[in-house]
Image: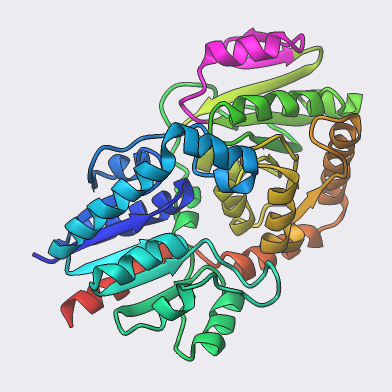
Amino acid sequence: MKRVLLLSNGHGEDLSGSLIGERLQASGVAVQALPLVGQGAAYRQMGIEVLGCTRAFSTGGLGYTSLGGRLTELFQGQLSYLLGRLLLFLRQSRQADLVVVVGDVIPVLAAWWSRRPVVTYLVAYSSHYEGRLRLPWPCGGCLNSRRFRRLFSRDAFTASDLTAQLGREVHFIGNPFLDPALAAGPAPGGPEPASRPLAQSLCLLPGSRLPEAERNLELMLRVLERLPASLQQPARLGLDAALVKQISLEQIAALAARRGWSLAGRSLRHGALELRLHWGRFPELLQQASLVLSMTGTAAEQAVGLGKPVTQLVGFGPQFTPAFAEAQRRLLGPSLVCSAGAPGTALSLAGTARLLEEQLEALATDSSLMDRCRANGRERIGGPGGSARMAEQILALLDD
């Protein structure tokens, strides 16, 4: 039996790696995963063995975005944890027929050092950021090594750019992370997002990392309070929040109470506003949404891939900071809009409410808006089936 070792370094990267791994396992390949960040929950949910003892840190692997984050990671021992994970990878890779890297320079360098055959999915890099991708040293040299049998990029523009830079073919065949957003199977229990007829609906994506996601949700409540009275009517605009299981109903009730919101079943209410809370319904909510209010990374990319217009709301981080949001707009293009203003200020919150109103008005009056968003989604993300296509090419390499 062929053996594949998946190496990834991020929550979104784990998701893509788990989807590829699931396909490989279904084809009779023995798959193991070694996530460098977090607990590897995506792998475990797919029934993929996660090697070693994993650990989550308060920065969520995003400490590099600020000096404070770097110091926090050092204090919490993330550097020594990473080195231990890399050493474990080098030991375990000896038994692998193929290493599959999902991420950036750190797993690329580790895979090169392992001297095993490698397939790389460079989901963390895109030429859309600057117009020409500047790979960090020594990533380019590693990717040109004969050990790297196949290179996948996250978009067609990057594939063309890297093919020219590296002098070897880089393939774009879609992004695995889009596939779960197309699987709209509702989870049992909880309110049905489509249980009432609505002209339009807004899906809130506050993120998955705690405690940031809680702070993000509170900022979103402050935006909803600033919507015009006509949009605060449930019959006019449906409001649904897609939440991760780590955020409990009790936590939400406590943060909402500080804003004068009350909890009624699985809904938050403030005057005429009604925000319905959902766990485990992300694909369904996203597909049914007219518009998305996002403070996320991968989930926003999935929304764009589905052709949805997205309004960003900048936060305090460590992930969804103004710098992250601006970089995401370069990556994902005209499907995203964002208000000016520092996080939590009246300028940012009121501006975001105005953008939501304008986007909803445009959806009602401009029939070409959705066509433009769908076209942009195909260009920036690609179509469905990326995990299956990558798995097919990996299987072909294993059979050589």
120 vs 91, left or right, is right
100 vs 399, left or right, is right
**Residue 60 in view of the camera:** yes
Task: Kindly indicate the quadrant of the structure image that contains residue 216.
Answer: top right
Q: How many numbered marks are there?
A: 0
Percent x, y of residue 290: 71, 44
Task: Name the residue nearer the viewer: 63 or 124.
Answer: 63
Does the magenta run of residues contain 247? yes
Percent x, y of residue 57: 45, 34
Percent x, y of residue 365: 88, 52
Task: Kindly indicate the quadrant of the structure image that contains residue 250.
Answer: top right
Task: Kindly indicate the quadrant of the structure image that contains residue 44.
Answer: top left
- At a point 31% along the width and 85% down the height, the residue shown is 146
- At a point 64% along the width and 63% down the height, the residue shown is 377
Magenta residues (range): 244-269
318 vs 385, left or right, is right
**Residue 392 in view of the camera:** no
Task: Name the residue nearer the viewer: 54 or 331.
Answer: 54
- At a point 27% along the width and 66% down the height, the residue shown is 99
